[in-house]
Amino acid sequence: MKNTFGSSVALTIFGESHGQAIGAVLDGLASGIPIDENFIEKQMNLRRAVGKLSTARQEADKVKILSGVFNGKTTGTPITFMIENQDTRSRDYGELAYKARPAHADFPAQMKYHGFQDFRGGGHFSGRITAGIVAAGAVAINALACKGIKIGTHILSCGGVYDRNFIDIENDIDTLNNLDFAVLDTDKAEEMKSVISSAKSEGDSVGGRLETAVVGFPAGVGEPWFDTLEGVLSHALFSIPAVKGVEFGSGFACADKKGSENNDAYFSENGRVFTETNNAGGIIGGISNGMPIVFRCAVKPTPSIYKTQQTIDLNTFEETSLQIQGRHDPAIIHRARVVADSITALVLCDQLALRYGTDWLA
């Protein structure tokens, strides 16, 4: 089971949803980078379940840093983040030991691990595991910010309600990073919350799209062919539970354009090179071109719904029915936004360390 990602700056995740603890180990980060525990707590709060739009499972998500930090700075050795599970209710999952939840990993996990997997709360496949990613990502986000690189994600759509697009990207990022519900148009935010509440009242769920932007990232980072910047980012983004699609810049829409419409014309200003448009999403030939990196992730509806569903018995493979009990999110997109930021920051730190050397981030 491969749980490590990254070449120079590498992240390893561990734990299960209802185990004693979950967490992450961040290895390869330069020494001397400040650790802001208040910022880590702020990021963790963005991922936590809060209010009626999220699961009733209430975890404090207090991060314990066990290694790799001394006197408020990274030491250059592995940083271990541990988060205890304190509000588990495993009895809700008794029936799920032998019934595969539709759109969950239960059936493929059974095929791979032969029944030895921890099925409680989704085990190691649970979105709960992203808490460790957010803790490590907070350190990466701060390291990038010290280099003038900013990351922000908004809910582009949820349940068919669309937010406005990025306009002034840097200011929009600053705005988003001070919002609990990351939507740029406040009216659309209320519409989205209403859609989520309606789905919850019906015992159902909704999905949507996240849009992420990065500003201040230098040109010339990434590789052609197999380790393209888009490819490495996509590889990591698809690790976020519920992400089923990733597109950069104009994405699939470019297939319906002519070259004259999709090409980004260059111009120079004060010795710097820019493009008139950004259909490429800041990446050409697998390498950053200095324009904002912009991409979108499709997030599926939360698979745990209260409606009765058809499934199979994992012991006999015979058909049966299932009605999921327990505490579940009617939507996870508003919580997933900080996970997208965190994964992006970790990948970019790794890519920058590969390009300029480990100490560049210090």
Image (tube, rainbow, N blue to C red):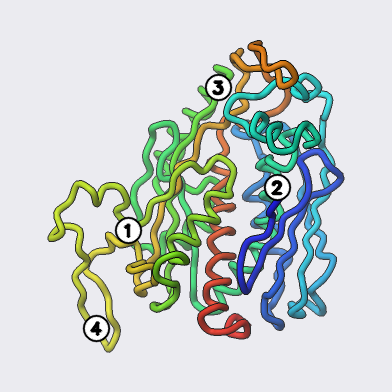
Q: Earlier in the sequence, mark 3 or mark 1?
A: 1
Q: Earlier in the sequence, mark 4 or mark 1?
A: 1
Q: CA distance from mark 3 to mark 1?
A: 33 Å
For label 3, the SS is loop
* Residue appearing at x 67%, y 23% in the figure: 100
Q: Amino acid at mark 2?
A: Ile
* Residue appearing at x 51%, y 22% in the figure: 198
Where residue 163 sits in the image (x, y, percent)? 38, 43
Q: Is residue 304 above or below residue 18?
A: above
Q: Which residue is mark 4?
A: 269
The reply to whether callout 4 and callout 1 are in contact (CB within 8 Å) is: no
Does 131 sit left or right of 203 as displayed?
Answer: right
Q: Amino acid at mark 3?
A: Asp
Q: CA distance from mark 2 to mark 3?
A: 23 Å
Q: Amino acid at mark 4?
A: Glu
Does 105 sit left or right of 264 as displayed?
Answer: right
Q: Which residue is mark 3?
A: 204
Q: Earlier in the sequence, mark 1 or mark 2?
A: 2
Q: Which residue is mark 2?
A: 129
Few, some or many residues within 10 Å of mark 1 (<14, 14–19, 20+): few
The reply to whether callout 4 and callout 3 are in contact (CB within 8 Å) is: no
Q: Which residue is mark 1?
A: 167
Few, some or many residues within 10 Å of mark 3 (<14, 14–19, 20+): many
Q: Is residue 177 above or below residue 86?
A: below
Q: Earlier in the sequence, mark 2 or mark 4?
A: 2
* Residue appearing at x 57%, y 71% in the figure: 350
The reply to whether callout 2 and callout 4 are in contact (CB within 8 Å) is: no
* Residue appearing at x 57%, y 23% in the figure: 200
Q: Nearer the viewer, residue 264 or 49?
A: 264
Q: CA distance from mark 4 to mark 3?
A: 52 Å
The answer to which quarter of the image holds residue 313 is top right
